[in-house]
């Protein structure tokens, strides 16, 4: 039973990653409006739902006295949680870009005031 559940999770995870990846590709092609885009919650919710489903299967397997299968499911749930947090962070950074530096020619270095008066 644990092997069947694991074999079902692999194509579901692959389709989820493929769907979210194609959504990011559509955004990179400029199909969205100009300006700061809102946070895309759809991929975050899909990944968190998948993570929750894997975690529930892991708990069920542990309760049914299948410690090896439950432990493997917990490891898959941890990996899915890491991916979910990564997707959320990427969506957050896309929606809230860092401000541009004050001197585009010297990024990261504060601009010194330009002295317009000639020196003697």
Image (cartoon, rainbow, N blue to C red):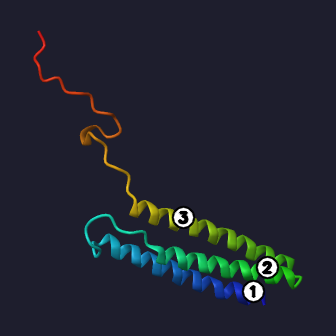
SS at badge 1: helix
* Picture quadrant where residue 32 is located: bottom left
> Which of 112/68 is in front?
112
**Disc 3: which residue:** 86
Label 3: few (<14), some (14–19) or many (≥20) C-alpha neighbours in 10 Å: few
SS at badge 2: helix
| Number of marks | 3
**Disc 2: which residue:** 59
Tell me how far mark 1 sits from mark 2, CA to CA: 15 Å
Q: Left or right: 116 with respect to 75?
A: left
Give how far across and how far down residue 44 sits, in percent: 52, 73
Question: Earlier along the polypeptide chain: callout 3 or callout 2?
Answer: 2
Q: Quadrant of the C terminus?
A: top left
Give how far across and how far down residue 80 sits, in percent: 63, 72
Which residue lies at the image location 87% right of the left edge and 85% below the top edge?
Answer: 64
SS at badge 3: helix
Give how far across and how far down residue 117 sits, in percent: 11, 19
**Disc 1: which residue:** 3
Q: Is residue 80 above or below residue 1?
A: above
Label 2: few (<14), some (14–19) or many (≥20) C-alpha neighbours in 10 Å: some
Which residue lies at the image location 70% right of the left edge and 84% below the top edge?
Answer: 6
Judged by depth in the image, the label closer to the viewer, 1 or 2, is 2
Tell me how far mark 1 sits from mark 3, CA to CA: 27 Å
Q: Quadrant of the N terminus?
A: bottom right
Residues at discs 1 and 3 in contact (Cβ within 8 Å): no
């Amino acid at each position: 039973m644990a092997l069947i559940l694991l074999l079902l999770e692999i194509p579901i995870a692959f389709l989820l990653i493929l769907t979210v990846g194609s959504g990011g590709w559509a955004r990179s092609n400029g199909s969205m409006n100009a300006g700061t885009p809102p946070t895309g919650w759809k991929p975050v919710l899909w990944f968190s739902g998948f993570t929750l489903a894997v975690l529930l299967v892991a708990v069920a397997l542990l309760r049914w006295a299948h410690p090896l299968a439950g432990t493997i499911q917990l490891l898959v749930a941890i990996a899915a949680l890491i991916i979910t947090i990564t997707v959320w962070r990427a969506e957050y950074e896309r929606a809230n870009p860092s401000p541009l530096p004050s001197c585009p020619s010297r990024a990261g270095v504060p601009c010194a005031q330009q002295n317009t008066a000639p020196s003697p």
